[in-house]
Image (tube, helix red, strand yellow):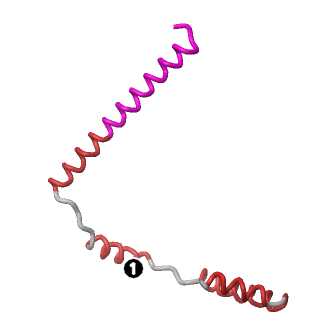
């Protein structure tokens, strides 16, 4: 039996006043969590820099290769959409229009 089912069973066993009390406790915990102290800007920037040092940055050759892959993919997909649009528009005009 998972936690969710156990919680549901506990809720069903509790009476009205017990349920009200548990709801008030839950609200107090949520309110306390909302009041947590925010991270100061200096500490935030320090942590961001530490995380960015862990990133595996691509070298120049990899960046050029990735850029070319993206450009080729964009050109191919754009051409595909353009071609499909042209064919469908001609078909619609042929079936429903005059020409």
Toward the front, the furthest residue is 1
Above or below residue 81? Residue 55 is: below
Residue 47 image point, x, y percent: 36, 77
Q: Is residue 85 magenta?
A: yes
Q: Which residue is labeled 1 in the image?
A: 43
Toward the left, the furthest residue is 61
* Secondary structure mostly taken by the magenta-highlighted segment of the chain: helix
Q: Residues within 10 Å of mark 1 (few under 14, many from 20)?
A: few
Q: Identify which residue is drawn at 61% across, 80% down.
A: 34
In this rendered view, identify the residue nearer to me: 73 or 14. 14
Residue 79 image point, x, y percent: 35, 31
Quadrant placement of the N terminus: bottom right
Q: Is residue 9 magenta?
A: no
Q: Secondary structure at mark 1?
A: helix
In this rendered view, identify the residue nearer to me: 77 or 27. 77
Residue 44 image point, x, y percent: 40, 76
In this rendered view, identify the residue nearer to me: 76 or 9. 9
**Start-end of magenta stretch:** 74-99
Toward the right, the furthest residue is 16
- The image quadrant that residue 55 belongs to is bottom left
């Amino acid at each position: 039996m998972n936690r969710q089912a156990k919680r549901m069973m506990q809720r069903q066993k509790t009476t009205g006043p017990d349920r009200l009390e548990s709801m008030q406790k839950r609200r107090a915990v949520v309110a306390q969590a909302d009041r947590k102290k925010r991270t100061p800007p200096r500490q935030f920037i320090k942590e961001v820099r530490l995380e960015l040092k862990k990133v595996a940055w691509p070298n120049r050759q990899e960046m050029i290769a990735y850029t070319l892959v993206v450009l080729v993919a964009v050109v191919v997909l754009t051409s595909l959409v353009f071609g499909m649009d042209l064919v469908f528009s001609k078909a619609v005009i042929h079936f429903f229009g005059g020409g």
